[in-house]
Image (cartoon, grey):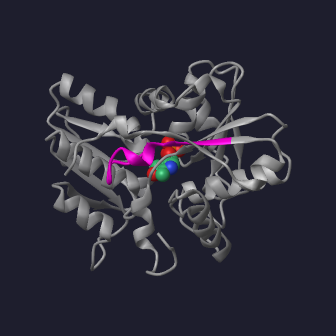
Amino acid sequence: MPPIDLSAITTDQLFLPQFAEKKVSVSVLRLDKIHPLVSGNKWFKLQYYLKEAKEKGQQRIVTFGGAWSNHIIAAAAACRLQQLPCTGIIRGERPAELSLVLREASTLGMEIEFISREDFATQQLPAHLNREENCIVPAGGYGPTGARGAAEMLDHAVNSKAFTHICCAVGTGTMLAGLQNRAAAHQQVIGISILKNNFQLEKETAALLTSPEKLPVILHDHHFGGYAKYQPALLQFMNEWYRQTGIATDFVYTGKLCYAVNNLIVSGYFPEGSNLLLIHSGGLTGNRSLKNGLLIF
Ligand SMILES: *Cc1c(COP(=O)(O)O)cnc(C)c1O
């Protein structure tokens, strides 16, 4: 497996006619390029959990996720790279056949355990894992430690202070909070929630902010039916976006982000002269759960 390569990150400006027409500039921060499995924001969110575990001499990373979660595959690969044993605690019952993500995570050395949905909801640790030698990473890397790592994403953008708006997809809100914490006062951070009616998000994001006076904007109307749900229009858009920009997106997060921002631009949401930075937070492995042939990339 290749190492994580932060030098691969680029800031790509896109030149699409609808952006020129609205006099809006759009660039994409390509965090998807750092690694095939520990892609995008997952590495940034995990980095300080792993560092602190090592410093404390903890022996094992234990984390939570769903059977198709990007976080689980990223955690498995990151632990493999750092030679840290790890356990993934997965929501629900063990299915007859493990998902692609779980099979790959277990090939990478992650031990997989299943817990009930109720225990998962409160992130209840199985008793045998509830030990000081274990470093517990909440689902999605949610927490101040995750947000601290996510803030560093902006340090990799070329001329980052020139952007007026920073836009990202939102699951737990950890990345959004990290970006808000690192953004300059003149920059508006906008999160596109990919979950349906997740109105906990405002509170959960606010809990991770270092200066709670300035809140990011969270938009809730761009989820296409909910987590990992989609409609043909989303896949069509992702194919068209790829044709025009050469940038592949995933249908769970970054596809919804680009679709939403593109629509917001076209509808005049951003004032003339706006200079947008879209965070490509990776996650392309998620497309493997789609039927073959739906995407052209
Ligand atoms: C996990 C993930 C997110 C969501 O990040 P949060 O910090 O949980 O909000 C966004 N984009 C991609 C590609 C992801 O894999």
Residue 11: percent from the left, percent from the top? Answer: 52, 38
At x 38%, y 48%, the residue is 39
Q: Is residue 19 left or right of residue 231?
A: right
Q: Is residue 22 at all visible to an observer of this figure? A: yes
| 128 lies above or below 210 | below
231 left or right, relative to 73 = right
Residue 126 visible here: no
Give coordinates of residue 74: x percent, y percent: 32, 50
Residue situated in front as seen by the camera: 241 or 17: 17
Residue stretch in magenta: 26-40
| Front-lying residue, 73 or 160 | 160
Please say if 58 is above or below 171.
above
Residue 255: % across, % down: 58, 59
Residue 71 vertical placement versus 165 (above, below): below
Assess whether residue 30 is covered by the magenta stretch: yes
Residue found at x 70% / y 55%: 260
User: Total label count?
Assistant: 0
Q: Name which residue lies at 20% across and 54% down.
A: 110
- Tell me residue 269's x, y (percent): 83, 45
